[in-house]
Structures are given as C-alpha cells and as structure tokens.
Amino acid sequence: MLIGELLKSVHGTPYWIAPEVINESGYGRKSDIWSVGCTVFEMATGKPPLSHMAKMAALFYIGTRRGSMPMLPDGFSESAKDFVRICLTSDQKLRPSADQLLHCIMYCNQKV
C-alpha cells in the first residue's frame, strides 16, 4: 500500500475493527493502530474491548462512535491506560502513527 493510499472495503474481526473500516470511509495504517490497542487490551484483560456485547452490537457501537471505548481497569499503570486510550481514538486523523507510538514508548519515559 502506498503512503496515503486508503482502502474502502470491510475486513476484519468484529471486536478489533476500526470505526473507519466499519463505516467504509477509507482506511490505512492507522486502522492497524486501532487493532494494536484492541490486542493490548485483550492481552491485559483476557478479553477484547466490548466483548460483553454481541458482535453486531459491538460493530454498531464502534461504527457510530456512540461512546468511548473501555479503558484498562485499575491496577494497570497510567502509561498503559494512555497507550490503549490513544490507540483507540475514534477519529483516525487524531490516532497516532506507529512511529509516534514508538517515539512515545522509547522517549517519553512511558512504560507500557
């Protein structure tokens, strides 16, 4: 995929699909950042975000941006919570790139 190139078809696993993929509004590498956030959430809690919802309900919730995504529970560091929170930013234009995430982890003294 060329830089700046967006795809416009729906693919993915329901609980990990980024809002822009659900809405077929064009997606790129930042959609993968959303999935990273979902994966880290699952690694930390044993379940993906919104797993308490049926798959279609979760897709609707994510796609309509009706509410914020769940955060890591208490007991996790603020840095870990922030990492997941910024990965799960609904607006892909505001979501960090992989380089920005790496910079934050390596240079901002944040432990994830």
Image: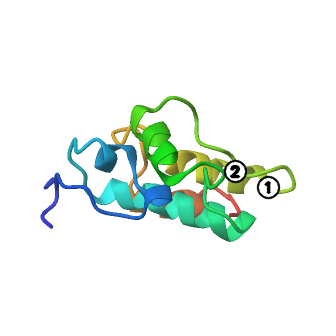
Residue 42 in the image, given as x and y percentages of width and height? 64, 65
Q: Residue at x 16, y 59 (%)?
A: 3
Q: Position of residue 95 (x, y in %)?
A: 42, 45
Quarter holding residue 77: bottom right
Q: In which quadrant will I find the N terminus?
A: bottom left
Helix, strand or loop at disc 1? loop
> Badge 1: how crowded within 10 Å, few (<14), some, or many (20+)?
some
Q: Which residue is label 2 attached to?
A: 81
Left or right of 105 in this view: 100: left
Q: Up-down: is 11 above or below 68?
A: below
The reply to whether residue 103 is visible in this rendering is no
Which residue ends up furthest to the top in the rendered image? 66
* Tag shown at residue 77: 1
Tell me which residue sits at (55%, 59%) in the image.
38
Q: Amino acid at mark 1?
A: Ser
Report, in whole angstroms, how far the alpha carbon at label 2 lies from the one at label 1. 6 Å
In this view, the residue in front, 41 or 111, is 41
What's the residue type where badge 2 is placed? Lys
Answer left or right for 107 relative to 111: left
Above-or-below relation of 37 to 26: below
Residue 81, above or below 29: above
